[in-house]
Amino acid sequence: MSAWAEKNAPGRRVWALEGTGSFAAGLVVNLLEAGEAVVEVGSLKRARGAKNDRIDAIRAARQAIARDAQPLLVSRSENGPCSDSVSRPVRHTCDVAISLDGVAHVRLTVTDIDRSRAFYDRVFGLPVAVQMPSDADEQTRQQLAFLYGGVIYRLGTGLLGLRPVAAAEDRFDEDRVGLDHLSFAVADRQALQAAADHLDSLGVPHGAIKDLGGSAVLEFRDPDNIALELFTVDAG
């Protein structure tokens, strides 16, 4: 569509759409992704049975030029999808405003750092990214106060943290607001079986490997009852 527009309307242009929700939402997103500018015009007034694409296009263009339209939806390459040249907020497409590359880190609140570290070290063996040195001076302790006495592990390209601030009697419940479970990716079903064997050797209870049809999962819990799982998607 962008190629067609470049051929028929080269240079600076604006797409005027009659409604950008529901059926047109996908079109809006695709246009924005392609670096196009989009404006939402109001419903066009027509006589009954008088729909005419050429006349409708002219009416839409007049609305856009007269600014009798919903706020301009600007591509990421310009001012960002949630503002136009006069910084007016837009509707419908602000859900595509922030471009994400993945999850940077997850930090779990735990009750006992020694118990949790023993579990995560034995189960996953992740390298430590940040922890409080045993001989830390006061300045270092202040700089690392965000650890709250916990630890941060390296996990792939991200981080996994443990923060020991919960009351000793507290227990995780996935039916409360917040985290439901934390899922880690593994290479394949063979890795899932190896993980199940490893958990068995540690005496860590776990469920059976579940076949989800094209994927599989192995579920277990940490000492605070936090729901964990290992997940894989079948190749192909």
Image (tube, rainbow, N blue to C red):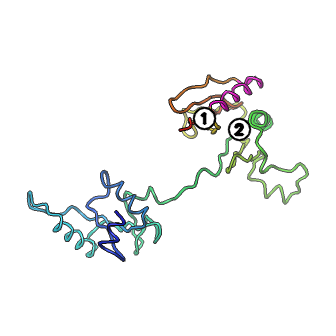
Category of crowding for the residue at label 1, using alpha-carbon neighbours closer than 10 angstroms: few (below 14), some (14–19), many (at least 20): many
Outermost residue to the front: 236
Viewer-nearest residue: 142 or 38: 38
- Residue 103 in the image: x percent, y percent? 60, 50
| Secondary structure of residue under mark 1 | strand
Magenta span dominant secondary structure: helix
Q: Which quarter of the figure has residue 111? A: top right
49 lies above or below 80: above
Mark with earlier residue (1, 2) = 2
Residue 225 belongs to magenta span: no
Q: Residue at x 70, y 28 (%)?
A: 194
Q: What residue do we see at 51% from left, 59% from top? A: 98
Which residue carries the number 1 mark? 231
Left or right of residue 24: residue 202 = right
Q: Relative to 93, say whether 185 is above or below.
A: above
Q: Position of residue 166 (x, y in %)?
A: 70, 38
Q: Is residue 4 above or below residue 65?
A: above
Q: Residue at x 77, y 46 (%)?
A: 151
Please state which of residues 177 and 66 is positioned toward the viewer in this rendering: 66
Q: Position of residue 109 (x, y in %)?
A: 68, 41
- Residue extent of the magenta highlight: 189-204
Q: Which mark is residue 110?
A: 2
**Percent of width and height locating residue 196:** 69, 26
